[in-house]
Amino acid sequence: MTNLATVLTRTAQATPEAPALKFMGNDISYAALSGLAGKLAGSLRENGIQPGDRVAIILPNVPAFPVVYWAILMAGGTVVPMNPLLKAGEIDYFFTDSGAKMAFVWPDFVDEATKGAANAGTRVIPTGPMGPVEGTVEGGEPIAEPIARDDEDTAVILYTSGTTGRPKGAELTHKNIRLNAERSSSVILEVKPEDVIMGCLPLFHVFGLVVGLVAATTVGASLALIPRFDPAEAIRTVTAEKVTIFQGVPTMYAAILNHPDADTMDASSLRACASGGSAMPLEVMRGFEEKFGCMILEGYGLSETSPVASFNMPDRERKPGTIGVAIPGCEMRCVDLEGHEVPVGEVGEIAIRGDNVMKGYWGKPDATAEAIPDGWFRTGDLATMDDEGYFTIVDRKKDMILRGGMNVYPREVEELLYTHPDVLEVAVVGMPDDLLGEQVGAAVALRPGASVTPEELVEWSKERIAAYKYPRKVWIVSELPKGPTGKILRREVHAPADA
């Protein structure tokens, strides 16, 4: 019976003075972090939180997030991380669906959270940079050792983005997260205690939470937090804190690469960069590596897989454009609609089996059975696998465009458009077409000072890609819609009426 929070208490006992967190020029030691978490855990128990009770966190990347996260686990509770930008109606759904008893909320978001808590009866706790506001939750003896929990007990409920229907809560167990963090830190990124990991990925997202916070804590490394991603602040933090491991999504790398302050970033300390969350455009990867002299390792995962499933491993050949090979303890394959494995090189849906796969969707047995019909989790992502076990994402199953009976994968068209010198960001989507069923469209954000026209981009694409693939409609936008990690949201891209 191993509570995930023992990761913190063991590291605090082994290296009490080592910096766990770096924030706005200040260091917080592992002893201090463990002490704050243990004190709050005692208060949670005193205030009625029992093993298995759900407690929400609605905080930016400030030290209070790790404090509250570890405290909930130490008290035996289940963590429900939530995006601070959610509105009252969305919060209502998350609180009600999870049955959250308490929520630790950043002061700026207390009003929305309070409105959202009315139906569920969730107790809202205003929380500042270091923890709960004084007088809001007190009492109880500090907890020195985490409450015993079973490996298969739910540690975290992470709500998926809800591309279809309302979000579903993926139940990740103590074992799921512990093993994924161990493999992320030791096998993939080879994290050492002296490393400083960039903490610009939101901690309420599975990538930042597990591969950032928990992986760093597992080996006693430091996590350099910035409240919310900003390329200028990221550049400053890499330089000031001598960051050695950068973790981000592709748009973060692109934002830094194209920022006016990029030349001021001292990247000499960087020894590893990891990218996930969405496909990394090869032009962005090449540009970042050439400018800063650091190799980017691209991987793949989902909330339902804790998150990492595959990676370009440091001890194996890196294949740019691929998501690497399955990590230890995880199996991956490409399957057809009936669940049969497709031949090497053919497109199929990625299916995953292993100790990283979630317990299920919270309170939704039918959705769980549909997602994991035979022990293999169906990801909804289309890919090919080569003869060495490297996977290449083709696209989301739901994003594929069917034009006149021909399959068009948006990522392939996006990769082409990214090579145009005037293109900063692009999202390719399907548009209704009376004759062909769907037509290919592209929303494009241009680099500052660029003057290329939509018509010129159409003609440029037509010369470089098959006739059925090139975008018939291109429209220019000031920026593309993005999710909390900076991932471009194709589902929110819509062609203008005159396109």
Image: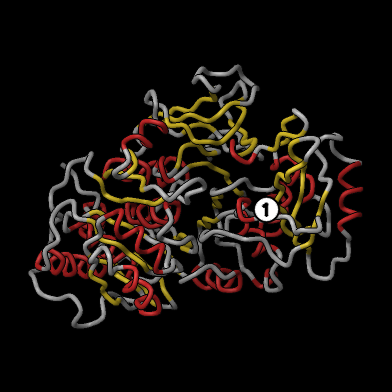
- Is 382 above or below relative to 308? above
**Is residue 308 toward the left or the right of residue 438 in the image?**
left
Colour pattern: secondary structure
| Residue occupying image coordinates x 30% and y 60% | 95
Q: Secondary structure at mark 1?
A: helix
**Is residue 188 toward the left or the right of residue 288 in the image?**
left
Q: Residues within 10 Å of mark 1 (few under 14, many from 20)?
A: some
**Is residue 292 toward the left or the right of residue 116 in the image?**
right
Farthest residue, direction bottom: 134
Whether residue 14 is visible to the viewer of this picture, yes or no, is: no
Q: In the rendered image, which quarter is residue 209 located in?
A: bottom left
| Residue occupying image coordinates x 87% and y 49% | 458
| Residue occupying image coordinates x 20% and y 59% | 13
Closer to the camera in the image, 431 or 390? 431
Please provide percent x and percent y for residue 378: 47, 32
| Residue occupying image coordinates x 69% and y 48% | 281
Farthest residue, direction front: 434
Type of the residue with mark 1? Glu
- Is 152 above or below relative to 497? above
Q: In the rendered image, which quarter is residue 268 located in?
A: bottom right
* Quadrant position of the C terminus in the picture: bottom right
Reading the image, the residue beneath label 1 is 289
Closer to the camera in the image, 470 or 1? 470
- Is 68 above or below relative to 288? below
Closer to the camera in the image, 491 or 342? 491
Please provide percent x and percent y for residue 74: 19, 57
Whether residue 300 is visible to the viewer of this picture, yes or no, is: yes
Please provide percent x and percent y for residue 288: 68, 56
* Quadrant position of the N terminus in the picture: top left
